[in-house]
Amino acid sequence: MADCVLCGCCLEGCPLLAATGREELSPRAKALLAGPSKWNAGELPETDVAALTGLCLGCGRCEKLCPQGVRVPVLMAAMRAGHPDFKQWLWKQWITKLGPFWSLAARGAALAPEAFVPGSLGLALKGLKGLRPGKGLAPWLSITRFPAQAFAAKHAGRAVAVFDGCVGQGPRAAWAETARFLLRGLGAEIVEAKFSCCGSTLGMAGLPEAQADARRANIAAWRGAGRPLLATYCATCRKGLAEYAAGGIAGGLFADEAEAALWRAAVTPLAALLAGAAAKTGRGAPAIVGYHQPCHADLNDGAGDADLALLSGLLGLRLRTPAKGGCCGFGGILQLVAPELSLKVGRGCWTSLDGALGFSAAPEVTPAYVLTGCSGCAMQLSATAPRGAQVGHWLEIILRK
Ligand code: SF4
Ligand code: SF4
């Protein structure tokens, strides 16, 4: 990775800098401290490393703007990994122990007295409360035309596996069911495979070995299923999966370049497979629907945001998106280290949504109604939503009939 030249191009994209005005939290400051030629991370005092590396959302907005190709989230992950006393043990517990029981954890979060919830987990648990089973949005959109011919022409003979991610496998199993309903509508042959966590959260928490294990398990499951298309409905999962093949065979995950290329071409947003679908609204449809664009929706690879394209086609003028969408503030490990900053960034996001939707002017008449396409964003927006607001993944509005 190239070294930082301190140009400052990344500054305008950093939600943490925008929310706090603190230059020491900026990507430039982090790149300067963590860059290859500036410091040996191992020489920094542990407390400084913890403070620095914990205060990053991992949103990747800075790397999209960097002309040098500096990847601050990757630098932060490496520094976390180099300092084992860092709080990654807590995040590891959260993901590896709690992950399979998220459904239960979500119920537990709803029941746990706030006084018994550790302060640093409060916001994360609040997010889980928002995702607990039975608490999704009521559906109101019927698909009237599936682009089955276009799907068959493009992917003839290729089966599809759905990568549900931790939330789709746990508290929001309804997302998984709706994803399969939509694929059946396309006429797709669906194959089931036992996937693990995509691993990106583990990597960001400074747990490269756990991340590599998750990646190997997912590739093995994909091979076992006959190397099908991999449809995802979480922007962060998609980014995490796409990165498996970013270095070709250099990462040691794939047998050869051909298999790496096959993986690269296999990972696809579910929404992209549905491009060209038509729908009609039913009872309960809100007059105005907001869309929160996840930071990880645009991979900077020219693919754009397939969720936004699909929803624009299905909802037309009903859909509103902030001209300058903000980060929700989920930020993985930041929630554990500095939940107040996560909340501050989240409030800024709701302010930009309000600018597009205007819900604060008459919240009783037009309450906030916001859809997104990322599990982390859905959790965080649920945790930070103003009173009366409704938040969910776009899959929740689809009627399954
Ligand atoms: S990853 Fe996001 S929060 Fe972290 S430095 Fe970059 S822009 Fe700022
Ligand atoms: S990280 Fe990239 S964009 Fe930011 S100051 Fe350094 S070289 Fe410039």
Image (cartoon, grey):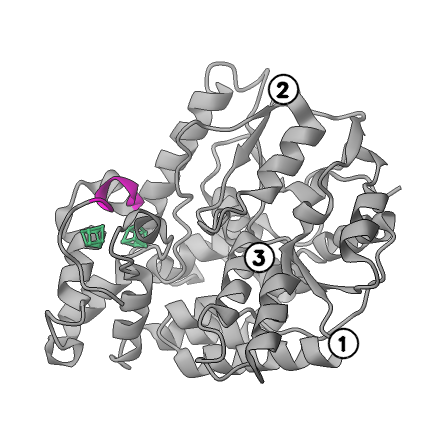
Q: Is residue 226 left or right of residue 123?
A: right
Query: Could one spot residue 188 in this view of the protein?
Result: yes
Q: Of 315 and 363, which appears nearest the observer?
A: 315
> In the rendering, which numbered label is found on residue 111?
3
Residue 395: image x %, image y %?
70, 45
Q: First in sequence: mark 2 or mark 3? A: 3
Residue drawn at (67%, 55%), measured in percent from left and top? 172
- Dot 3: few (<14), some (14–19), or many (≥20) neighbours within 10 Å? few
Write down the residue under mark 1: 226
Residue 283: image x %, image y %?
80, 25
Q: First in sequence: mark 3 or mark 1? A: 3
Q: Which residues are magenta?
A: 9-15
Quick one: SS at disc 2? helix
Quick one: SS at disc 3? helix
Quadrant in which the N terminus is drawn: bottom left
Query: Could one spot residue 136 in this view of the protein?
Result: no
Q: Is residue 30 left or right of residue 266?
A: left
Residue drawn at (34%, 54%), measured in percent from left and top? 57
Q: Is residue 321 left or right of residue 328?
A: right
Q: Amino acid at mark 2?
A: Leu
Residue drawn at (70%, 43%), measured in percent from left and top? 396
Write down the residue under mark 2: 317
Q: First in sequence: mark 2 or mark 1? A: 1
In space, the residues marked 2 and 3 are separated at their CA atoms by 40 Å
Residue 35: image x %, image y %?
18, 67
Q: Is the shortest distance between ligand 1 and the CB of mark 2 under 8 Å? A: no
Q: Of 190 and 119, which appears nearest the observer?
A: 190
Say which quarter of the image contains residue 82.
bottom left
Q: Amino acid at mark 3?
A: Leu
In space, the residues marked 3 and 1 are separated at their CA atoms by 42 Å
Quick one: SS at disc 1? loop
- Dot 1: few (<14), some (14–19), or many (≥20) neighbours within 10 Å? some
